[in-house]
Image (cartoon, rainbow, N blue to C red):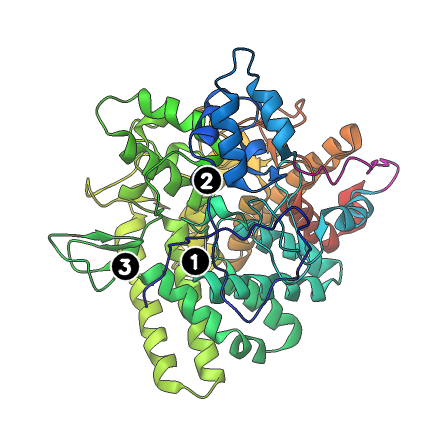
Amino acid sequence: MRIIYGFLFILFFTACRQNVAPDTSAPLTGLQSPEALYGELFVDVQMAAVFPDGKTFVDCSPKMAPTKIVADYQEAKQEADFDLEAFVLEHFELPHQYSTNFKADTSRSAAEHINALWPVLTREPDDVEPGTLIPLPNSYIVPGGRFGEIYYWDSYFTMLGLQSAGKVDMIENMIDNFAYLIDTIGFIPNGNRTYFLTRSQPPFFAAMVDLLAGEKGPSVRVNYLPALEKEYAFWMNGMEDVSNANPARKHVVRLKDGSILNRYWDEGERPRAEMYRDDVETAKENEQRTPQEIYSDLRAACESGWDFSSRWLADGQTLNTIQTTEIIPVDLNALLYNLELQLQQAYAENGQQDEADLFAQRAQQRRDNLIRYCWNPELGFFMDYNFVKDAFTATPSLAGLYPLFFGMAEPEMAEQVAQIVQSDFLKPGGVVSTLTNTGQQWDAPNGWAPLQWITIKGLRNYGRNDLADTIKERWVDLNVRVYKHTGKMVEKYNVLDMSLEAGGGEYPVQDGFGWTNGVLLRLLQESPTTLEN
């Protein structure tokens, strides 16, 4: 199945611009990124850093047709007293700030605070409006802060909290939105913005369907079988083209012995629209590679969700040495293993036994291949593998817990992984993402809610409840303490220095926050009295 990426015309309206509900039966067409729409104006705004955060401008809504704005710019910029910021504010509406009226009440418990936040983070079905937002037919939960749209992998961890809160209808709405995107675009973008149409994110859709099946029964998998099939086709697109001479095509990599595994990859070879200036400056710092190569690897790292981390850096420290597209990631291939298993179950439940047998075989092959290439017996840990260098990368990370989360590891492997988690990754506030401090947000000293959950659940799958409970207690204590001091749930936390309110990274700390809320509420549900005190 070929995935169509070309989008030729944007869904803009005239000045009267009546709101029209999205047609869920027809493909989304005519979606263009802001750099395609505004050309020189876009580049000038981003390179001049008119807004401190590069995401602000790409989330603005035009007050008139883009062609009119571009024409006005060509004329206005010739004036001696031209003010670029004033021009932008005259021609664009700034992104709406949804949470400005919400006031935290720290006399509430953390669980009560999270449940009070669901309405703040809820977006109703989108109207088709000017701007970069891709309209969705059902309500959904956004992360919060600068992230005013739905994000793919964030949503699975948010759903854990929705499940705990009894909001199964919202889980189903969000899954239906993702199925809609798969059906109309061909895959689930990073987020529902036009500038994300070149990449996806870690493929948690199958895990979401499995979560809903646990609530509503196994027939759910059959209902989403067409979407699961298309999701799989997207990630495996190019498998027919790989060979010894050309080992990598899109997301698919053929290893030296003919084994097939996957990598993160992005269609684009240009700076990210939302971080345009940052990417241009990063590319200038490495004269050994072309800017297009660096842009591709930066974008691929964004598809991983780990933007950015020493996982992807050739020297383990410097962003301009990024090499994401050379790496077979442990987490991605564990997620695709789960997708193959969910397809197997869906086919079996639908009476398609031949197809079920095929995907059982594919899942087994992927498990074997992942262990062959990503299990480091000397370290006793699952590691990312650089297929170009034919070697493990040098960065142990919590991505190595995904095979435990999905039950892929042998018991003796899981025990070795647990020992390293306990000796190296466990910190006063939970588990740290990697053991390297680079200043990147997915490295030490930061801890993230999704990785706490993957680690806790993975350890429990192999009977290490003692270590899992220690991680849970430390993480919950950190989350609750920061909430009591600040009234906020934040995107990431410093798990080494308990005196800090949050962790650092590529952009300022964001509050809200979808996946923190989801994981914390799920953990609090297990033993709410002891954990909140």
Residue plotted at (42% across, 76% down): 344
Give the residue at mark 1: 335
Which range is magenta? Answer: 95-108
- Label whose residue precedes the other's in the sequence (3 or 2): 2
Magenta segment includes 35: no
Residue at horizontal 59 percent and vertical 31 percent from the top: 495
Q: What element carries label 1?
A: helix
Counting other residues with Cα less than 10 Å from the Cα at mark 3, is it few (<14), some (14-19), or many (20 or more)?
A: some
Quadrant for the C terminus in the image: top right
For label 2, the residue is 306
Type of residue at label 3? Asn
Q: Note whether 498 is above or below 202 in the view shown.
A: above
Per the model, the C-alpha gap separating discs 3 and 2 is 23 Å
Residue 23 seen from this side: yes
Q: Position of residue 200 (x, y in %)?
A: 44, 51
Quadrant in which residue 262 is drawn:
bottom left
The image shows residue 374 at horizontal and vertical percentages of 31, 49
Instruction: Give the residue at mark 3.
Output: 369
Circle 1 or circle 3, nearest the eye: 1
Residue type at mark 2 is Trp
Choose the circle earlier in sequence order: 1 or 3. Answer: 1
- Answer with mark 2 or mark 1, whichever residue precedes in sequence: 2
Q: Residue furthest right?
A: 107
Asked if residue 317 can be seen in this view, the reply is: no
